[in-house]
Image (tube, grey):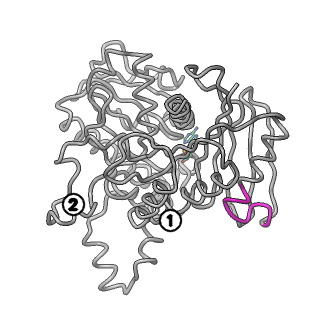
Protein backbone atom coordinates (compact mmCIF):
# COMPACT_ATOMS: atom_id res chain seq x y z
CA UNK A 1 0.00 0.00 0.00
CA UNK A 2 1.30 3.45 -0.97
CA UNK A 3 0.15 6.77 0.48
CA UNK A 4 0.18 10.00 -1.49
CA UNK A 5 -0.22 13.45 0.03
CA UNK A 6 -1.50 16.30 -2.12
CA UNK A 7 -0.85 19.91 -1.14
CA UNK A 8 -2.32 23.09 -2.53
CA UNK A 9 -0.78 26.06 -0.72
CA UNK A 10 -2.48 29.44 -1.21
CA UNK A 11 -1.53 32.79 0.25
CA UNK A 12 -3.07 32.01 3.64
CA UNK A 13 -4.39 28.49 3.18
CA UNK A 14 -3.18 24.94 2.81
CA UNK A 15 -5.51 22.41 1.17
CA UNK A 16 -4.51 18.80 1.52
CA UNK A 17 -5.54 15.31 0.55
CA UNK A 18 -4.37 11.86 1.59
CA UNK A 19 -4.76 9.21 -1.10
CA UNK A 20 -4.14 5.50 -0.97
CA UNK A 21 -2.76 3.50 -3.87
CA UNK A 22 -3.46 -0.24 -3.96
CA UNK A 23 -0.96 -0.99 -6.67
CA UNK A 24 1.21 1.11 -8.99
CA UNK A 25 -1.32 1.20 -11.82
CA UNK A 26 -4.45 1.75 -9.71
CA UNK A 27 -6.52 4.89 -9.30
CA UNK A 28 -5.51 6.75 -6.09
CA UNK A 29 -8.39 6.66 -3.63
CA UNK A 30 -9.01 9.70 -1.41
CA UNK A 31 -8.96 8.93 2.33
CA UNK A 32 -8.85 12.40 3.86
CA UNK A 33 -9.53 15.83 2.35
CA UNK A 34 -9.12 19.09 4.23
CA UNK A 35 -7.92 22.63 4.50
CA UNK A 36 -6.35 25.02 6.97
CA UNK A 37 -7.32 28.59 6.12
CA UNK A 38 -6.40 31.98 7.60
CA UNK A 39 -2.86 30.75 8.33
CA UNK A 40 -1.17 33.13 10.77
CA UNK A 41 -4.38 35.04 11.45
CA UNK A 42 -7.02 33.01 13.28
CA UNK A 43 -6.43 29.71 11.45
CA UNK A 44 -9.21 27.14 11.10
CA UNK A 45 -8.76 23.49 10.21
CA UNK A 46 -11.44 21.49 8.46
CA UNK A 47 -11.02 17.89 7.36
CA UNK A 48 -13.26 14.99 6.52
CA UNK A 49 -12.79 11.36 5.69
CA UNK A 50 -13.69 10.00 2.28
CA UNK A 51 -16.86 8.62 3.87
CA UNK A 52 -17.80 12.16 4.96
CA UNK A 53 -16.97 11.88 8.69
CA UNK A 54 -15.77 15.18 10.16
CA UNK A 55 -12.19 14.71 11.34
CA UNK A 56 -11.59 18.33 12.25
CA UNK A 57 -13.56 21.56 12.35
CA UNK A 58 -11.68 23.67 14.84
CA UNK A 59 -9.92 26.97 15.27
CA UNK A 60 -6.20 26.72 15.83
CA UNK A 61 -4.11 29.23 17.70
CA UNK A 62 -2.16 31.56 15.43
CA UNK A 63 1.09 30.07 16.75
CA UNK A 64 -0.10 26.56 15.88
CA UNK A 65 -0.40 27.55 12.24
CA UNK A 66 1.89 30.59 12.10
CA UNK A 67 3.11 29.73 8.59
CA UNK A 68 2.85 26.97 5.96
CA UNK A 69 5.48 24.82 7.69
CA UNK A 70 3.54 24.91 10.98
CA UNK A 71 0.29 24.27 9.12
CA UNK A 72 1.82 21.21 7.47
CA UNK A 73 2.82 19.91 10.92
CA UNK A 74 -0.85 20.18 11.99
CA UNK A 75 -1.88 18.30 8.84
CA UNK A 76 0.59 15.52 9.59
CA UNK A 77 -0.64 15.27 13.18
CA UNK A 78 -4.19 14.91 11.90
CA UNK A 79 -3.17 12.22 9.42
CA UNK A 80 -1.23 10.35 12.12
CA UNK A 81 -4.33 10.47 14.34
CA UNK A 82 -6.86 9.56 11.67
CA UNK A 83 -4.76 6.98 9.85
CA UNK A 84 -2.05 5.64 12.12
CA UNK A 85 0.66 3.93 10.09
CA UNK A 86 0.14 6.03 6.97
CA UNK A 87 3.52 6.37 5.25
CA UNK A 88 3.82 9.12 2.67
CA UNK A 89 5.76 7.90 -0.38
CA UNK A 90 4.93 10.80 -2.65
CA UNK A 91 3.79 14.39 -2.29
CA UNK A 92 2.05 16.16 -5.16
CA UNK A 93 1.98 19.95 -5.18
CA UNK A 94 -0.26 22.34 -7.03
CA UNK A 95 1.99 25.07 -8.43
CA UNK A 96 0.31 28.00 -10.12
CA UNK A 97 3.09 28.81 -12.58
CA UNK A 98 5.30 26.50 -14.61
CA UNK A 99 6.52 29.21 -16.98
CA UNK A 100 6.86 28.68 -20.73
CA UNK A 101 8.64 25.33 -20.50
CA UNK A 102 6.58 23.02 -18.29
CA UNK A 103 3.78 21.29 -20.19
CA UNK A 104 3.65 18.25 -17.85
CA UNK A 105 4.21 17.59 -14.13
CA UNK A 106 7.84 17.44 -13.04
CA UNK A 107 9.77 15.90 -10.17
CA UNK A 108 10.82 18.53 -7.67
CA UNK A 109 14.58 18.67 -7.26
CA UNK A 110 16.58 21.58 -5.76
CA UNK A 111 17.31 22.76 -9.34
CA UNK A 112 13.63 22.67 -10.34
CA UNK A 113 12.70 24.49 -7.14
CA UNK A 114 15.25 27.24 -7.93
CA UNK A 115 13.87 27.56 -11.46
CA UNK A 116 10.30 27.81 -10.14
CA UNK A 117 11.38 30.46 -7.63
CA UNK A 118 12.72 32.52 -10.56
CA UNK A 119 9.13 32.56 -11.90
CA UNK A 120 7.86 34.32 -8.75
CA UNK A 121 7.65 37.73 -10.51
CA UNK A 122 5.14 36.17 -12.93
CA UNK A 123 2.77 35.17 -10.11
CA UNK A 124 3.85 37.17 -7.05
CA UNK A 125 0.67 36.52 -5.08
CA UNK A 126 0.61 32.74 -5.57
CA UNK A 127 3.98 31.25 -6.50
CA UNK A 128 5.88 32.18 -3.28
CA UNK A 129 3.16 30.50 -1.18
CA UNK A 130 3.10 27.40 -3.39
CA UNK A 131 6.85 27.11 -2.99
CA UNK A 132 6.63 27.67 0.77
CA UNK A 133 4.43 24.55 0.80
CA UNK A 134 7.03 22.67 -1.24
CA UNK A 135 9.86 23.65 1.09
CA UNK A 136 7.85 22.61 4.14
CA UNK A 137 7.08 19.24 2.53
CA UNK A 138 10.69 18.67 1.44
CA UNK A 139 11.77 19.23 5.05
CA UNK A 140 9.03 16.95 6.43
CA UNK A 141 9.46 14.15 3.84
CA UNK A 142 13.05 14.16 2.62
CA UNK A 143 12.67 10.57 1.33
CA UNK A 144 9.40 11.03 -0.56
CA UNK A 145 9.07 11.72 -4.27
CA UNK A 146 7.78 15.28 -4.68
CA UNK A 147 5.99 16.32 -7.84
CA UNK A 148 4.97 19.76 -9.12
CA UNK A 149 1.68 19.99 -11.04
CA UNK A 150 1.23 23.28 -12.86
CA UNK A 151 -1.95 25.27 -13.42
CA UNK A 152 -0.39 26.61 -16.61
CA UNK A 153 0.73 23.27 -18.09
CA UNK A 154 -2.58 22.33 -19.72
CA UNK A 155 -2.44 25.47 -21.90
CA UNK A 156 1.15 25.21 -23.09
CA UNK A 157 0.08 24.01 -26.54
CA UNK A 158 -1.83 27.18 -27.39
CA UNK A 159 -1.27 28.42 -30.90
CA UNK A 160 0.88 31.59 -31.12
CA UNK A 161 -2.14 33.90 -31.51
CA UNK A 162 -3.50 32.72 -28.17
CA UNK A 163 -0.10 32.78 -26.49
CA UNK A 164 1.00 36.32 -27.23
CA UNK A 165 0.05 39.94 -26.56
CA UNK A 166 0.35 42.75 -29.08
CA UNK A 167 3.60 43.93 -27.50
CA UNK A 168 7.09 44.09 -28.99
CA UNK A 169 8.46 40.60 -29.47
CA UNK A 170 11.17 41.05 -26.82
CA UNK A 171 8.50 40.86 -24.10
CA UNK A 172 7.20 37.54 -25.41
CA UNK A 173 10.75 36.22 -25.36
CA UNK A 174 11.07 37.41 -21.75
CA UNK A 175 8.00 35.39 -20.80
CA UNK A 176 5.21 37.97 -21.08
CA UNK A 177 2.68 35.52 -22.55
CA UNK A 178 -0.87 34.31 -22.16
CA UNK A 179 -0.28 31.36 -19.87
CA UNK A 180 -3.81 30.51 -18.78
CA UNK A 181 -4.59 28.91 -15.41
CA UNK A 182 -6.98 26.39 -13.73
CA UNK A 183 -5.24 23.75 -15.85
CA UNK A 184 -5.64 20.96 -13.27
CA UNK A 185 -9.39 21.48 -13.27
CA UNK A 186 -9.57 21.50 -17.09
CA UNK A 187 -7.40 18.40 -17.25
CA UNK A 188 -9.80 16.63 -14.89
CA UNK A 189 -12.88 17.68 -16.88
CA UNK A 190 -11.27 16.58 -20.16
CA UNK A 191 -10.62 13.18 -18.57
CA UNK A 192 -14.18 12.89 -17.27
CA UNK A 193 -15.56 13.70 -20.71
CA UNK A 194 -13.72 10.70 -22.17
CA UNK A 195 -15.73 8.59 -19.70
CA UNK A 196 -19.10 10.37 -19.83
CA UNK A 197 -19.27 11.40 -23.48
CA UNK A 198 -16.26 10.40 -25.62
CA UNK A 199 -17.81 11.92 -28.75
CA UNK A 200 -17.95 15.30 -26.98
CA UNK A 201 -14.39 14.96 -25.72
CA UNK A 202 -13.29 14.61 -29.33
CA UNK A 203 -15.19 17.75 -30.32
CA UNK A 204 -15.26 21.48 -29.53
CA UNK A 205 -15.89 22.07 -25.83
CA UNK A 206 -15.91 25.14 -23.61
CA UNK A 207 -15.39 24.55 -19.90
CA UNK A 208 -16.50 27.31 -17.52
CA UNK A 209 -14.66 26.92 -14.22
CA UNK A 210 -16.70 29.28 -12.05
CA UNK A 211 -15.55 29.51 -8.45
CA UNK A 212 -13.91 32.20 -6.34
CA UNK A 213 -11.39 32.18 -9.16
CA UNK A 214 -13.09 31.89 -12.54
CA UNK A 215 -11.96 31.24 -16.07
CA UNK A 216 -13.08 29.54 -19.26
CA UNK A 217 -11.18 27.26 -21.59
CA UNK A 218 -11.90 26.24 -25.17
CA UNK A 219 -10.72 22.73 -26.06
CA UNK A 220 -10.66 20.55 -29.12
CA UNK A 221 -10.04 16.85 -28.59
CA UNK A 222 -9.33 17.51 -24.90
CA UNK A 223 -6.51 19.99 -25.65
CA UNK A 224 -6.68 23.65 -24.68
CA UNK A 225 -6.90 26.00 -27.65
CA UNK A 226 -7.65 29.24 -25.81
CA UNK A 227 -8.35 30.44 -22.30
CA UNK A 228 -9.90 33.56 -20.79
CA UNK A 229 -6.99 33.99 -18.38
CA UNK A 230 -3.75 35.39 -19.67
CA UNK A 231 -0.48 36.49 -18.14
CA UNK A 232 -1.85 36.53 -14.62
CA UNK A 233 -4.82 35.08 -12.78
CA UNK A 234 -6.48 38.52 -13.09
CA UNK A 235 -7.58 38.40 -16.71
CA UNK A 236 -10.86 37.30 -18.26
CA UNK A 237 -13.97 36.86 -16.13
CA UNK A 238 -14.62 38.95 -13.02
CA UNK A 239 -14.11 36.80 -9.92
CA UNK A 240 -14.87 36.86 -6.20
CA UNK A 241 -12.43 39.70 -5.53
CA UNK A 242 -10.48 39.97 -8.82
CA UNK A 243 -11.44 42.40 -11.55
CA UNK A 244 -11.15 40.22 -14.66
CA UNK A 245 -10.41 41.78 -18.04
CA UNK A 246 -9.41 45.43 -17.66
CA UNK A 247 -8.26 48.06 -20.13
CA UNK A 248 -4.56 48.63 -19.26
CA UNK A 249 -5.35 52.33 -19.60
CA UNK A 250 -7.18 52.07 -16.28
CA UNK A 251 -3.95 51.03 -14.57
CA UNK A 252 -2.12 53.99 -16.16
CA UNK A 253 -4.89 56.29 -14.98
CA UNK A 254 -4.68 54.97 -11.42
CA UNK A 255 -0.91 55.55 -11.42
CA UNK A 256 -0.86 58.91 -13.11
CA UNK A 257 -3.99 60.55 -11.73
CA UNK A 258 -4.84 58.74 -8.51
CA UNK A 259 -1.20 58.51 -7.36
CA UNK A 260 -1.48 54.78 -6.68
CA UNK A 261 1.61 52.59 -6.44
CA UNK A 262 2.05 49.04 -7.65
CA UNK A 263 1.18 47.40 -4.32
CA UNK A 264 -1.96 49.48 -3.90
CA UNK A 265 -3.12 48.67 -7.43
CA UNK A 266 -2.39 44.98 -6.92
CA UNK A 267 -4.47 45.06 -3.73
CA UNK A 268 -7.31 46.80 -5.60
CA UNK A 269 -7.31 44.42 -8.57
CA UNK A 270 -6.78 41.16 -6.68
CA UNK A 271 -8.60 41.73 -3.38
CA UNK A 272 -11.11 44.57 -3.62
CA UNK A 273 -12.63 44.19 -7.08
CA UNK A 274 -14.82 41.59 -8.81
CA UNK A 275 -18.11 40.57 -7.20
CA UNK A 276 -17.06 42.09 -3.88
CA UNK A 277 -16.08 45.44 -5.37
CA UNK A 278 -19.07 45.76 -7.66
CA UNK A 279 -21.66 44.71 -5.09
CA UNK A 280 -20.04 46.42 -2.12
CA UNK A 281 -21.46 43.45 -0.23
CA UNK A 282 -19.71 40.12 -0.70
CA UNK A 283 -17.39 38.05 -2.89
CA UNK A 284 -19.67 35.07 -2.29
CA UNK A 285 -22.22 34.24 -5.00
CA UNK A 286 -24.62 32.63 -2.51
CA UNK A 287 -24.83 35.89 -0.55
CA UNK A 288 -25.32 37.94 -3.70
CA UNK A 289 -28.11 35.68 -4.94
CA UNK A 290 -29.83 35.92 -1.55
CA UNK A 291 -29.39 39.71 -1.25
CA UNK A 292 -31.60 40.76 -4.17
CA UNK A 293 -30.38 44.37 -3.97
CA UNK A 294 -29.56 46.43 -7.08
CA UNK A 295 -25.76 46.42 -6.59
CA UNK A 296 -25.79 42.65 -5.93
CA UNK A 297 -27.91 42.04 -9.04
CA UNK A 298 -25.65 44.29 -11.11
CA UNK A 299 -22.57 42.36 -9.98
CA UNK A 300 -24.29 39.09 -10.96
CA UNK A 301 -25.33 40.69 -14.25
CA UNK A 302 -21.77 41.71 -15.11
CA UNK A 303 -20.45 38.24 -14.17
CA UNK A 304 -22.98 36.58 -16.48
CA UNK A 305 -22.44 39.12 -19.28
CA UNK A 306 -18.69 38.45 -19.33
CA UNK A 307 -19.22 34.68 -19.33
CA UNK A 308 -21.56 35.00 -22.33
CA UNK A 309 -19.10 37.26 -24.20
CA UNK A 310 -16.31 34.79 -23.55
CA UNK A 311 -18.57 31.96 -24.70
CA UNK A 312 -19.07 33.73 -28.03
CA UNK A 313 -15.37 34.53 -28.42
CA UNK A 314 -14.17 31.05 -27.52
CA UNK A 315 -16.78 29.47 -29.82
CA UNK A 316 -15.35 31.52 -32.69
CA UNK A 317 -11.82 30.46 -31.73
CA UNK A 318 -12.93 26.81 -31.77
CA UNK A 319 -14.82 27.17 -35.08
CA UNK A 320 -18.12 26.25 -33.43
CA UNK A 321 -19.31 24.54 -30.28
CA UNK A 322 -20.43 21.03 -29.34
CA UNK A 323 -20.62 21.28 -25.55
CA UNK A 324 -20.47 23.67 -22.61
CA UNK A 325 -19.39 22.28 -19.24
CA UNK A 326 -19.99 24.09 -15.94
CA UNK A 327 -17.73 23.36 -12.95
CA UNK A 328 -16.38 25.09 -9.81
CA UNK A 329 -18.42 26.13 -6.76
CA UNK A 330 -20.72 28.43 -8.75
CA UNK A 331 -20.83 26.33 -11.92
CA UNK A 332 -21.69 23.16 -10.00
CA UNK A 333 -24.23 24.69 -7.62
CA UNK A 334 -25.84 27.84 -8.95
CA UNK A 335 -29.03 27.05 -10.87
CA UNK A 336 -29.49 30.79 -11.44
CA UNK A 337 -26.10 31.49 -13.01
CA UNK A 338 -26.33 28.46 -15.33
CA UNK A 339 -29.80 29.55 -16.40
CA UNK A 340 -28.75 33.16 -17.02
CA UNK A 341 -25.65 32.09 -18.98
CA UNK A 342 -27.68 29.85 -21.29
CA UNK A 343 -30.69 32.16 -21.69
CA UNK A 344 -31.36 33.16 -25.30
CA UNK A 345 -28.45 31.09 -26.60
CA UNK A 346 -30.61 29.37 -29.22
CA UNK A 347 -28.61 31.22 -31.91
CA UNK A 348 -25.60 29.05 -31.04
CA UNK A 349 -27.71 25.88 -30.81
CA UNK A 350 -28.00 25.76 -27.03
CA UNK A 351 -31.24 25.10 -25.18
CA UNK A 352 -31.37 24.55 -21.44
CA UNK A 353 -33.81 22.10 -19.82
CA UNK A 354 -35.05 24.01 -16.77
CA UNK A 355 -35.97 20.94 -14.76
CA UNK A 356 -32.65 19.19 -15.39
CA UNK A 357 -30.88 22.42 -14.48
CA UNK A 358 -32.81 22.73 -11.21
CA UNK A 359 -32.03 19.13 -10.38
CA UNK A 360 -28.36 19.64 -11.20
CA UNK A 361 -28.26 16.64 -13.53
CA UNK A 362 -25.10 15.88 -15.47
CA UNK A 363 -26.70 16.86 -18.78
CA UNK A 364 -28.87 19.97 -18.38
CA UNK A 365 -29.64 20.74 -22.04
CA UNK A 366 -32.80 19.51 -23.76
CA UNK A 367 -32.66 16.41 -25.95
CA UNK A 368 -33.08 18.67 -28.99
CA UNK A 369 -30.29 21.07 -28.03
CA UNK A 370 -27.49 20.77 -30.63
CA UNK A 371 -24.95 22.03 -28.07
CA UNK A 372 -24.91 19.81 -24.99
CA UNK A 373 -24.69 21.55 -21.64
CA UNK A 374 -23.21 19.58 -18.75
CA UNK A 375 -22.44 20.01 -15.06
CA UNK A 376 -19.35 18.07 -14.00
CA UNK A 377 -17.94 18.48 -10.47
CA UNK A 378 -14.23 19.13 -10.80
CA UNK A 379 -11.50 17.46 -8.72
CA UNK A 380 -8.06 19.04 -8.88
CA UNK A 381 -6.73 16.88 -6.02
CA UNK A 382 -7.12 13.60 -7.91
CA UNK A 383 -5.21 15.08 -10.87
CA UNK A 384 -2.32 15.87 -8.51
CA UNK A 385 -2.50 12.42 -6.90
CA UNK A 386 -2.43 10.72 -10.31
CA UNK A 387 0.62 12.76 -11.33
CA UNK A 388 2.38 11.69 -8.13
CA UNK A 389 1.42 8.05 -8.83
CA UNK A 390 2.77 8.30 -12.38
CA UNK A 391 6.04 9.79 -11.15
CA UNK A 392 6.41 6.98 -8.60
CA UNK A 393 5.89 4.53 -11.47
CA UNK A 394 8.47 6.23 -13.68
CA UNK A 395 11.24 6.18 -11.12
CA UNK A 396 10.39 2.62 -10.01
P1 LIG B 1 -14.99 27.53 -5.23
O1 LIG B 1 -13.92 28.59 -5.26
O2 LIG B 1 -14.92 26.64 -6.44
O3 LIG B 1 -15.04 26.77 -3.94
O4 LIG B 1 -16.40 28.30 -5.35
C1 LIG B 1 -16.82 29.22 -4.38
C2 LIG B 1 -18.03 29.98 -4.92
O5 LIG B 1 -19.09 29.06 -5.18
C3 LIG B 1 -18.57 31.01 -3.95
O6 LIG B 1 -18.89 32.21 -4.65
C4 LIG B 1 -19.86 30.37 -3.46
O7 LIG B 1 -20.84 31.31 -3.09
C5 LIG B 1 -20.30 29.65 -4.71
N1 LIG B 1 -21.35 28.67 -4.40
C6 LIG B 1 -21.23 27.52 -3.70
N2 LIG B 1 -22.45 26.92 -3.57
C7 LIG B 1 -23.35 27.73 -4.21
C8 LIG B 1 -24.76 27.67 -4.43
N3 LIG B 1 -25.51 26.66 -3.97
N4 LIG B 1 -25.33 28.67 -5.15
C9 LIG B 1 -24.60 29.70 -5.62
N5 LIG B 1 -23.25 29.80 -5.45
C10 LIG B 1 -22.63 28.83 -4.75
Q: Is residue 378 visible?
A: no
The verdict on label 2 being within 8 Å of ligand 1 is no
Q: Secondary structure at mark 1?
A: helix
Q: Is residue 107 visible?
A: yes
Which span is picked out in magenta?
63-71
Please tell me how crowded label 1 is: few (under 14), some (14-19), or many (20+) other residues with Cα within 10 Å: some
Please tell me how crowded label 2 is: few (under 14), some (14-19), or many (20+) other residues with Cα within 10 Å: some
Task: Assess whether residue 182 is covered by the magenta stretch.
Answer: no
Could you give the CA–CA distance between mark 1 and mark 2, rounded to whole angstroms? 27 Å
First-in-chain label (1 vs 2): 2
According to the image, label 1 marks what residue?
A: 271
Q: Quadrant of residue 206?
A: top left
Q: Nearer the viewer, residue 79 or 338?
A: 79
Q: Nearer the viewer, residue 34 or 57?
A: 34
The answer to whether 311 appears left or right of 289 in the picture is left
The answer to whether 367 appears left or right of 318 in the picture is right
According to the image, label 2 marks what residue?
A: 172
- Figure quadrant, ligand 1: top right
- Point out the residue furthest to the front here: 396
* Foreground disc of the pair 1, 2: 2
Q: Residue at x 38, y 63 (%)?
A: 122
> x%, y% of residue 89?
66, 37
Amino acid sequence: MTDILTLNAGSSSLKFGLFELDNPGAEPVAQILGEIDRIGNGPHMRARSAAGAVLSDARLSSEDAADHACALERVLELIARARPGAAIDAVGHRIVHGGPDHAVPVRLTPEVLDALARLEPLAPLHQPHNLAGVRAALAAFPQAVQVACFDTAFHRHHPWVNDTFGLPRAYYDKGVRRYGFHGLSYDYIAGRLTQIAPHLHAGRVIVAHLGNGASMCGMIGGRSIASSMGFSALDGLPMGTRCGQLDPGVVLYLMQHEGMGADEIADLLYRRSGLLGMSGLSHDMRELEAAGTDPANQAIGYFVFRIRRELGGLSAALGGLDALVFCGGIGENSVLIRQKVCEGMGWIGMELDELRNRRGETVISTDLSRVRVLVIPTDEEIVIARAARDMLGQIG
